[in-house]
Amino acid sequence: MIRHFDSILEEARKSRGVRIAVANAASDEVLEAVDMAHREGIVEAILVGDPVKTKEIMEAHDINPDEYTFVEAYTLQECAEKAVRLVHDGKAQILMKGLVDTSILLKEVLNKEYGLRKSALLSHVAVMEVPRYHKLLTITDAAMNIAPDVDQKAELIKNALQVTRALNIKEAKVAVLAAKEKADEKMPCTLDAVALKEMDFPGAIVDGPLALDNAVSKESARIKGLTSPVAGDADILLTPDIEAGNILYKSLNFLVFSKGAGILVGAASPIVLTSRADDEPTKLHSIALAVLMSQVKED
C-alpha cells in the first residue's frame, strides 16, 4: 500500500516513456505543471495547440521547447479532439486539460468514434495526504456528479477503486458518508448507504452510513460503539453529493495544509484536470497519480 505522495512520485519515476497529451497547452499554469513533471522524469509531453503561442510562454518561463513534441491546433475544439485522438490511438497514455473548457474536452472524450468512454459515468477522485491521518484518503465526488442516485454512487465507488488499485490497496475500505450512522427516511443518503452496503464490490469493503468522524477516527467509532472494519480506517470516502465532496476536498486542501491530487476517472485513460487555484505540488501529484493509473492492468 502506498501511504504518501513521496512514494507516488517515486513509483511514477519508474514508469519510463509515459506520454501525456495536453489539450491547448498555451497556459502559464499548465506548462509549469507539465515541465515540473517532465523535469522529475515522470512524463514526456505532447503539447497540442498553437505552437507559436505555446513557445512564447515557454520562453517566458525558461522551459526548453526542444524537449517537447508539438501538435498544431488553433481552436479549442480542435485542441480537444487532437489530444483525445492521441490517447485513443495509443500515442499518449494520459490526457490533460489545458486552456480549454471542460465541457469541450469532455464532449471529445465521450465521442463514439474516437473518444475514451469506458465506465457508465466519469467522476472526480481526489487523493489527500492529511497530517493527522495514517494513510492516504480518497474522496469522491468533488467536481463532476452533482446529486448522484444510488446506482450512480455504485459507479463512483467502482471508479474510485481504480485509483486505490493504483495505490496498491488490495481491499479498499469504503465509508459511505452521512450526518449520522443510522438509516433515516428523512435523509435519503443514509438509505443509499444501506443499499450500497448490500452490493458486491470486488476488492472493497463498503459500510455506511458513517459520519466523517467515525470513518476516520477509531476513537470516535469506539465511543459510539461501532465495530465496522471500515470505521476509523477508511480508504475511500464517498460523499452524499457534490457540495459535501467539494467542501471536504477544499477544506483539507486549504485549511489543514494537506497534500492533494485530483483526477478524472471512468475513461479508458486517466484525465488530469488541474485548477488554476491548485498549488504546484497538487498539479505534480495529479500527473504522477495519473501515471500510476496508466500502468494498472484491468482484469
Image (tube, grey):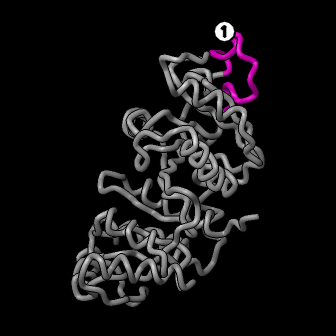
Quarter of the image with the C terminus in it: bottom right
Kind of residue sitting beneath label 1: Ile
In this view, the residue in front, 48 or 260, is 48
Q: How would you rate the neighbour count of disc 1 (Cα within 10 Å): few for under 14, some for 14-19, many for 20 or more? A: few
Q: Residue at x 71, y 38 (%)?
A: 199
Query: Which element type, helix, strand or loop, lies under badge 1?
Result: helix
- The answer to whether residue 70 is left or right of residue 160 is left
Note whether 202 is above or below 150 in the view shown.
Answer: below
Q: Evaluate whether residue 96 shows in this view.
A: yes
Q: Evaluate whether residue 261 shows in this view.
A: no
Note whether 140 is above or below 267 in the view shown.
Answer: above
What segment is highlighted magenta in the picture?
A: 218-234
Q: Quadrant of residue 200?
A: top right
Find disc 1 in the rendering and name its residue. Answer: 223
Question: Which secondary structure dominates the residues rendered in magenta?
Answer: loop
Note whether 73 is above or below 267 in the view shown.
Answer: below
**How many numbered badges does the structure rendering display?**
1
Note whether 158 is above or below 84 in the view shown.
Answer: above
Q: Residue at x 72, y 68 (%)?
A: 297
* x then y, percent, for residue 159: 60, 53
In this view, the residue in front, 134 or 194, is 194
Q: Residue at x 48, y 81 (%)?
A: 113
* x then y, percent, for residue 105: 36, 69
In this view, the residue in front, 266 or 12, is 266
In this view, the residue in front, 41 or 143, is 143
Is residue 217 covered in magenta? no
* x then y, percent, for residue 125: 51, 50
Q: Residue at x 61, y 21 (%)?
A: 214
